[in-house]
Each structure stands twice: as C-alpha cells, then as structure tokens.
Image: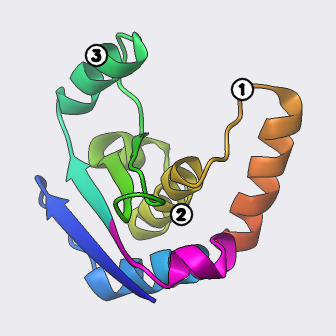
C-alpha cells in the first residue's frame, strides 16, 4: 500500500508532515479493505485561515459560517483519490482548550478522514459510531 499525502499550508502553522503521514496511514490501513489497499491512494490536506473555509462552507454546504474542518470525498475505488480535508487553523486554535494546537489539528484530520471513508454524524446512531471511531484513533496521536 502506498498513500501519497499532499499537505498544502496557507498559514504559518508549524507541523511535522511525518506525523500526519503516519496517522493517515494507520487509519487507512485499519478502515479500507485489502483490494483497495493494493492501489496507490492519494489524500490532500489543506491548512487555511481567514474567510476561505467560510466561503467553502457556504458554497458546498449552504452554511454561511466558519467551521473547523471540511471534507470533500474523492473516488478512491475508481481513481485512488480518497479526498481532500480542509482545516481552518484559526478555528482549531480557538477550540483547542487545554490541548496543543498540534493535537487539535490531528484530531480534525481524524474527523475529516473518517468522513472521507464514509462515516457521518447526521443522526444519533451515526454520531455515536463516529465518536467511537474517533476515540479509537485519537490514541494514535503523537505530539
């Protein structure tokens, strides 16, 4: 299995690409079946700030508000592209509480990646299932 992870940083967020690569690889290995894992897969993570995520949220979700993370699914069964994850660093900074920004951003990557892999939280059953998966993968976060 080979996953090509592209990280586009439109901010001054200091991060280790290696940490994100390991995290994404472990989740993908755990969640996708062996046939898909035989292919080369691609994922793009974009770190942004300012109004960009609000504009995307309005355009694609009809919500005129900032958010912390957006996911845009690819067609990994056909093209190998799992999708794109957009993370607003300013929003992550605001909501991190007593955790580090690095921890919060990795948590958002987990959340966004789970969406790309088909998890949702539109009803209570889905929400509980997604929260359980997030808790499972949060244990993988390295600072």
In this rendered view, identify the residue nearer to me: 88 or 109.
109
Residue position marked by numbered label 1 in the rendering: 122
Residue 137 among magenta residues? no
Element marked by disc 2: loop
- Residue at x 45% of width, y 86% of height: 22
Q: Residue at x 27, y 31 (%)?
A: 53
Q: Are marks 3 and 1 in contact (CB under 8 Å)?
A: no
Closest to the observer, 33 or 66: 33
Q: Residues within 10 Å of mark 3 (few under 14, many from 20)?
A: few
Tell me which residue sits at (33%, 51%) in the image.
84
Q: Local crowd at mark 2 within 10 Å, few (<14), some, or many (≥20)?
A: few
- Compared across the picture, whether 86 is left or right of 23 comes to left
Mark 2 or 3, closer to the camera: 3
Circle 2 sits on which residue?
99
Mark carried by residue 59? 3
Q: Quick one: 131 or 30, which is closer to the camera?
A: 30
Q: List the single residue furthest toward the right.
A: 125
Q: Which residues are magenta?
A: 29-42
Specify the quadrant of the image occupied by residue 3.
bottom left
């Amino acid at each position: 299995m080979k996953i090509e992870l592209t990280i586009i940083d439109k901010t001054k967020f200091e991060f280790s690409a290696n940490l994100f690569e390991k995290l994404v690889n472990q989740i993908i290995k755990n969640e996708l079946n062996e046939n898909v894992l035989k292919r080369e897969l691609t994922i793009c993570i974009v770190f942004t700030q300012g109004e960009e995520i609000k504009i995307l949220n309005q355009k694609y979700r009809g919500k005129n508000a900032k958010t912390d993370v957006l996911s845009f699914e690819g067609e990994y069964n056909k093209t190998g592209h799992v999708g794109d994850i957009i993370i607003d660093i300013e929003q992550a900074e605001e909501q991190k509480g007593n955790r580090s920004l690095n921890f919060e951003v990795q948590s958002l990557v987990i959340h966004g990646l789970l969406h790309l892999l088909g998890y949702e939280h539109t009803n209570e059953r889905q929400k509980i299932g997604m929260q359980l998966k997030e808790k499972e993968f949060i244990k993988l976060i390295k600072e």
